[in-house]
Image (cartoon, rainbow, N blue to C red):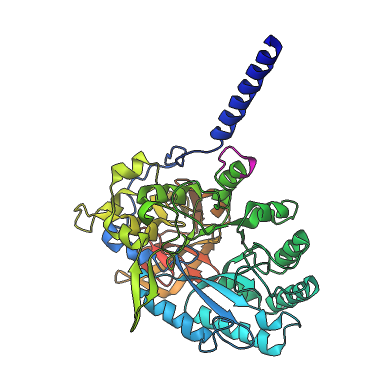
Amino acid sequence: MRLKSKIFCVVMVVALLIISLVGCNYESVITLTDLNLEYTPDGSVSHLTGDKSEELLNNVDRGFRLETYYTLGSGRAWPIDEGSDGYQMLNEEIEFYKEDKAVEIQVYIYLTEYSKKPLDDLALNQMKEYFEYIRNKNMSMLLRFAYDYEQPSTISTSEDIMLKHIEQIKRFNIANESLIKDTVTAYQFGMIGAWGEWGSSNVKYNQKKILNALIDAFPEGTYFQGRYMRVVNQTDKNSRSEYVGYHNDFLVGRPHPWNTAGNKYNSKDYKKFFNNAPYRLNDGEMPWGGYTDEPDEIVDGINFLKQMREHSMGTLSIKHNYIEPRKGKDDVIRNEHNIARWKKEYVTPQILMDNKLPYYDAWFKNSKGEVIQRSVYEYLRDYLGYVLMLDDFQIEKVGDNTEITFVVTNYGLGTPLTIRNMEVVVGDKVDGNIDFKNVKNYYVQIYDCKKLTTYKGQKITLTIKGDVTNKAIGVKLSRGNYTIKTANDTEFINGVNWIY
């Protein structure tokens, strides 16, 4: 009896230990590290006040994003909806969400009609014209290709056809490299499973082979996003793995098994995800309204903001859990969900500090210096991705030349990984006005966008030939043809932030 009793006690102790260890893998709230500014701003360049923060919403590769579909071959939006048109849907999305001022759009290109054959000239020409149309809208895409449009997937293509399509997409990208660089913020790993989400499929693929082919199909420097860690992990040995970020489509402000890295916060996958996120381009969306699994469908706004920082989130769907259609007897009724509710849920500097969320002081003031009220919705709109500010500006005469110094700091949740170019622009002044016909550009080689994670900054020092008396000095930050407005209350003309 004693032996059995001892064995029973040992078994119970082991069982309790296992339970406690498993329990430790699950946390009830998201925990974040402290935030400290790398450089303390001295106010030498005016900061953009909160009543003018919408001036930053034209900055590309960040913020709220839309969602639309285009089916090659038919030109429809949704593959099986005969009455739909891809261009019409795109324009309807832009019009409906115009108040949210999104310049990013997630685009699903459906290859459904080519699931048994290569892409033809019609498909390739349609794709080029569609991308050009988006470029003309001054928008940029989170791009995804897919075959299946329902779950479970039933019409998956063969691996041979899929690889043939990827090879054709590669040739298309090479022939249209400037168009791809202008219009693609990131490529979301698609092709496999319903909606190209890499869920269940009725065909078994060599996933690593597909992933490597997709990465190879896009120009150097392209960023990628994977829905699941099991997908992202398969790219670890690819030479471009540092460009592979995350797309999380079940964000509810707390750990959840359907999150990209799951809810086991002590797992190897979660630690990898959390450590990599600031150096990746990341996107997310909430579940559709009514599917959050939360009591009364209420998602806590502050916890959601913390999850955005956890993800170093760059873009977030404004289509999900915001204002969604529900068909009534006579018309379409729009139901409001969490993101709409967050327009009346407010934040203060103290709330943000207590929850280790980034911000800058002038965001809470108007141009008269008066304190203004800011909402969770506005915080998401303004701080998703990067918020770059110029400050600590100094001019010093060095012999016959001039040395200028300034600091660029990121106050956003994400890192400006696509904003790879910086130039200092010097122009003559005529009667106090800038002579734009006579400017000189100095490319800043030391600028490194990867250093600008949240609250981090980079000190820039540059020597300008001659004297700058009666000169205008500006800073140009860009991705290709897109130029970036900084969070400074200064003139933004011809893509240049004029700070002197």
The x, y position of residue 434, in whole percent, is 36, 71
- Judge left or right: residue 30 versus residue 100: right
Residue 467 seen in the figure:
yes
Residue at 58% across / 83% down in the picture? Answer: 80
Q: Please, is residue 26 above or below residue 53 in the view?
A: above
Q: Magenta region's main secondary structure?
A: loop
- In the picture, the quarter occupied by the N terminus is top right
The x, y position of residue 298, in whole percent, is 36, 54
Q: Please, is residue 340 above or below residue 110 in the view?
A: above
Q: Which residues are magenta?
A: 264-269
Q: Please, is residue 118 above or below residue 19 in the view?
A: below
**Which of the 4 quarters of the picture holds residue 53?**
bottom left
The x, y position of residue 499, in whole percent, is 37, 59
Residue 499 seen in the figure:
no
Q: Residue furthest right?
A: 160
Q: Residue furthest top?
A: 2
The x, y position of residue 231, in whole percent, is 67, 56
Residue at 75% across / 64% down in the picture? Answer: 210
Residue at 67% across / 90% down in the picture? Answer: 122
- In the picture, the quarter occupied by the C terminus is bottom left
Q: Is residue 473 magenta?
A: no
Of residues 331 and 103, the one nearer the viewer is 331
- Number of callouts in the render? 0
